[in-house]
Image (spheres, rainbow, N blue to C red):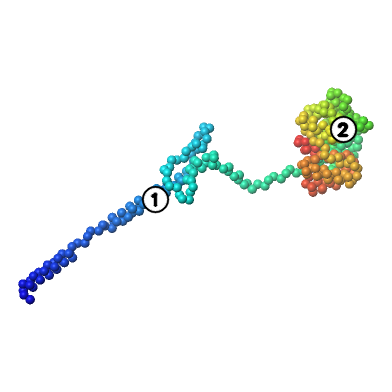
Amino acid sequence: MPSGNRTKTGKAKEGGKGKSRLKAAAPPPKRPATPVLVAWGLALILLVSLLYFADRGRNLPPSPQPPKVAKTSGAPTSGLRGPTRRPGPRPAHSAAPPPTIRQAVSPANVLPAPRPHTGAVPAKPARARLSVVIDDFGPNLAIARQFASIPFPVTLSVLPFLAHSGQIAAMARQRGREVILHLPMEPVDSRINPGPGALMVSMSSDQIRLSVVAALTTSPYFDGVNNHEGSRLTQDAKAMRTVLAELKDRKLFFLDSMTINTSVGWKEARLMGVPTFKRDIFLDDNLSAAAIRLQIEKAVKIAKARGAALAIGHPHELTLRALLSSAAYFRQEGVEMVFARDLVGR
């Protein structure tokens, strides 16, 4: 090959090689530094987070804070406005935005707080009480002593102006028994003699009052009064008011023996504020052991049904035996034996 051609070709090749070398030796394009990229990435993440939480915060209720108690001036609290919030899109699952704290405690939204369960057992009803009054004491001291020995409370009702009236009243009080005056009053049947010192409808108010005072002075131990006979006088409201006025002045109670169903004695006593109670059962109108026992059972049933009952008996041997044999029965039935004053609330 001629040298001239070789030279051009060689130069061309060399020039080509030179250009290739120049290209190969050129520096690579500049890339951003790694810290810059990391900073841009963090900034982007922070921006997205701020936008997300800002949008979500618009739809969430404010953080719970204790409600401020406004000074009451008579205006209703329902007109108070909650904190102002920028409107935002409602969540798809919610039909309405949650209430603010003040709305939640407004009177319209507050339900009555449930009563705390203390675990306390309701109180049982009061125990049934039964009082037994034995009338007509006065002529016989021995039988009075036997009734005063009954092992539960028994009230002894003593007639005035009889041989042993004062002794019986004193003996009964010494034995811790309740003593009342068995005050004689006029019966409907004029053939019946009610006894000395009886009150009669024909008496004036002054005569009735003086007769009551005389009967009461036969013993200082009387806690109250019940009527002996009196089926006529206890129907007379005026006469009974005279009797009851004297009892009220002396702070004595009145037991209506209910010798007639139309008696007004206990009603007038209530109207006048005199402690009173009326008889439920006569124990021994029929003097037989079986009949008396049946009456005792009736008295117990009344006491349990009504809470209290008053039974009246007389100083008979059969009545004494029936009561003595009933002590265990009263306990078994859960009936408390009390004095008459416990029934009239004294």
| Identity, as a three-letter code, of the amino acid under mark 1 | Tyr
The picture places residue 235, in percent across and down from the top left corner, at: 84, 30
Element assignment for label 2:
loop
Residue 105 can be seen in this image = yes
Q: Residue at x 54, y 39 (%)?
A: 107
The picture places residue 226, in percent across and down from the top left corner, at: 84, 34
Residue pushed farthest bottom? Answer: 1
Q: Is residue 26 left or right of residue 236?
A: left
Using the image as rendered, state which of residue 17 and residue 252 is in the foreground: 17
Q: Residue at x 88, y 39 (%)?
A: 314
Q: Residue at x 8, y 70 (%)?
A: 8
Q: Quadrant of the N terminus?
A: bottom left
Element assignment for label 1:
helix
Using the image as rendered, state which of residue 42 and residue 315 is in the foreground: 42
- Residue denoted by label 1: 52
The quarter of the displayed image where residue 132 is located: top right
Residue pushed farthest right? Answer: 191
Q: Is residue 285 left or right of residue 4?
A: right
The quarter of the displayed image where residue 310 is located: top right
Q: Residues within 10 Å of mark 2 (few under 14, many from 20)?
A: many
The picture places residue 4, in percent across and down from the top left corner, at: 5, 72
The picture places residue 149, in percent across and down from the top left corner, at: 85, 42
Q: Is residue 300 left or right of residue 110?
A: right
Examine the rendered structure and indicate whether residue 330 appears above or below residue 218. Answer: below
| Identity, as a three-letter code, of the amino acid under mark 2 | Ser
Disc on res. 116? none
Disc on res. 231? 2
